[in-house]
Amino acid sequence: MTAMDTFAARYLSGDALWGDDFTPQQIEEWFADEREAYADLGSASSCAEAYGYHGLNLQSGYRHLPGRRFAHALGVGSAFGGEFLPLLERIDKITILEPSSRLRSTDLRSVPLRYVDPSPAGDMPFETDTFELAVCLGVLHHIPNVTKVVQEMGRVVAPGGWVVIREPVISMGDWRSRQHPGLTKRERGIPRRLLEAAVRDAGFSIQSSVFCAATLTPRIGRVLRRNLYGTRWGAAVDRALAVSTAWNYRYHADNLWQKLRPSAVCIVAQRQ
């Protein structure tokens, strides 16, 4: 068996997650590559009010949360904090774990934001049971040691607290030898089975896990000249497309037909 065959059998198959077993030095190198990579794609000139995924987050994630207040919320890689806007009236305090020095703001509609630098090793500098809610949307696939970071979320979220995680669950191509426009150097999706297992192993009980971000959705959005992820009706269209193509889900696509599938999963889970 060639090296490529071995790699495909282990990682492109979705049986194991590339990066999750890296050495400390490999993790440091990955972290250095990704620290400002998202900002370099153009997001540094954005702001919280320009956040464009509210419809998707509400449809696939936030509507499954209880209607309670959250005294202290954690944003993992939340940048300017825009993803918290639909929940802002129910949150007293927000702390954001953010590697980029360019994706930060002082407050979110008068709610102060506290920023903390993450550790490449994945250890979070917070006391156990600190938060009632943790939100991590489209961040873990930029991180090598995913299992460690999810375990830390399980440690810092208090029993009875909640986590919302949305991640691509497709390979996003062969990440070893490519740099596609719009993608950072290191990002790769997380196989759904492995992501759900990491959440459960961290002490969470999954209340909802749904496919979203169908590969057809952005194409339809370009035709309509609308961001479908930003509206409730657009997110409903995406949900229908994701459900109708879920039968074709696989981690890595080898041809165009296999790319007709949902590309992400949104998980809402409660800490036990």
Image (cartoon, rainbow, N blue to C red):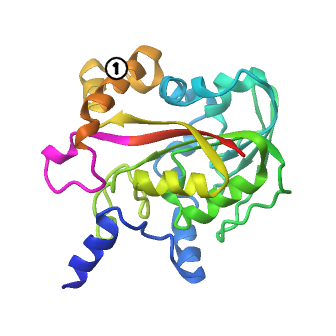
Image quadrant assignment for residue 111: top right
Along the viewing direction, whichever of 245 and 97 lies nearer the viewer: 245
The magenta stretch is: 249-263
Q: Residue at x 25, y 34 (%)?
A: 245
Q: Is residue 220 left or right of residue 263?
A: left
Say which amino acid is labelled 1.
Val
Q: Is residue 193 magenta?
A: no
Whole-percent x and y of residue 92?
84, 30
- The answer to whether residue 18 is seen in the rendering is yes
Relative vertical location of residue 258 with respect to residue 209 in this rendering, above or below: below
Choose top left, top right, bottom left or bottom right for residue 14: bottom left
The residue shown at (83%, 50%) is 129
In this rendering, the answer to whether 101 lies above or below 211 is: below
Apparent side of residue 126 relative to residue 210 in the rendered image (left or right)? right
Residue at 69% over, 53% down: 153
Neighbour class for label 1 at 10 Å: few (<14), some, many (≥20)? some
Question: Is 127 positioned to the left or the right of 254 in the image?
Answer: right
Quadrant in the picture for residue 128 = bottom right
Decide: is 130 above or below 219: below
Nearest the eye: 11 or 116: 11
Residue lying at 42% horizontally and 22% vertically, measured from the top left: 235
- Say if the magenta span includes residue 251: yes
| Residue 266 percent location from the top left of the image | 49, 38
- Evaluate whether residue 227 shows in this view: no
The x, y position of residue 16, in whole percent, is 40, 68
Q: Which residue in the protein does label 1 denote?
A: 237
Residue 86 pos. (x, y %): 64, 23
